[in-house]
Amino acid sequence: MTRFWPLGVFLVLVVFLYVGLYLDPHEVPSPLIGKPAPAFALTKVDDPAQTVAREQMLGRVWVLNVWASWCVSCREEHPLLVEFARHVPVEIYGLDYKDQRPEALSWLAQFGNPYKAALFDGDGKVGIDFGVYGVPESFVIDKKGVIRYKQIGPFTEDALMNKLLPLLQKLQAES
């Protein structure tokens, strides 16, 4: 009987791997969904004398997009965010994660700035509070300051139109 244990363990592993092939890594649930967004007060990338805090966004729906100038996937996502920001009435705040201010400024000048404000998180502490483990990641935060959605990895046009836009419209309609 004990000689079949290795075969049993192997079959269990095969089943787990087979199921894993059909999971979408962008659909990893966040433990922060349904909870208040972490408090923060960060300086703006383009003006270190100006601070933006989470409390300033209470009463409106907003998106926090975590990005960095060194992030290759952010470069893929960024043109979509620039276009989305032009056509959709939602405030998008950028969280410049573990970056250098001059590089971030240069990146925004080169690729466009879709953000109401780009916030500087040079040490990554705010990103860690949000549970960021890679960039880009984005969060939708409702009028009460509660995280309602997390996008892991870059937004695609499909995700912007079929997930983000309907959610934003729903949240903006709520009182």
Image (spheres, grey):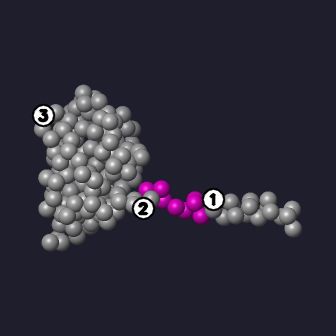
Q: Is residue 63 left or right of residue 133?
A: left
Mark 2 or mark 1, which has the lower sequence index?
1
| Disc 3 residue crowd, few under 14, some 14–19, many 20+, Cα 10 Å | few
| Residue, disc 2 | 29
Q: Quadrant of the N terminus?
A: bottom right
Mark number, residue 106: none
Q: Secondary structure at mark 1?
A: helix
| Residue, disc 3 | 49
Q: Is residue 23 magenta?
A: yes
Alpha carbons under labels 2 and 3: distance apart: 36 Å
Mark 2 or mark 3, which has the lower sequence index?
2
* Residue in view at x 12 percent, y 34 percent: 49
Q: Position of residue 171 (x, y in %)?
A: 21, 67
* Residue in view at x 13 percent, y 53 percent: 56
With respect to residue 101, does 117 lie above or below? below
Mark number, residue 17: 1
Alpha carbons under labels 1 and 3: distance apart: 51 Å
* Residue in view at x 52 percent, y 61 percent: 23
Magenta segment range? Answer: 19-27
Q: Position of residue 68 (x, y in %)?
A: 32, 38
Q: Amino acid at mark 1?
A: Leu
Q: Secondary structure at mark 2?
A: loop
With respect to residue 159, does 73 lie above or below? above
With respect to residue 101, does 27 lie above or below? below
Q: Is residue 83 magenta?
A: no
Nearer to the camera, 162 or 92: 92
Mark 1 or mark 3, which has the lower sequence index?
1
Q: How many numbered marks have been drawn onto this rendered protein structure?
A: 3
Which mark is in front, 1 or 3? 3
* Residue in view at x 14 percent, y 72 percent: 175
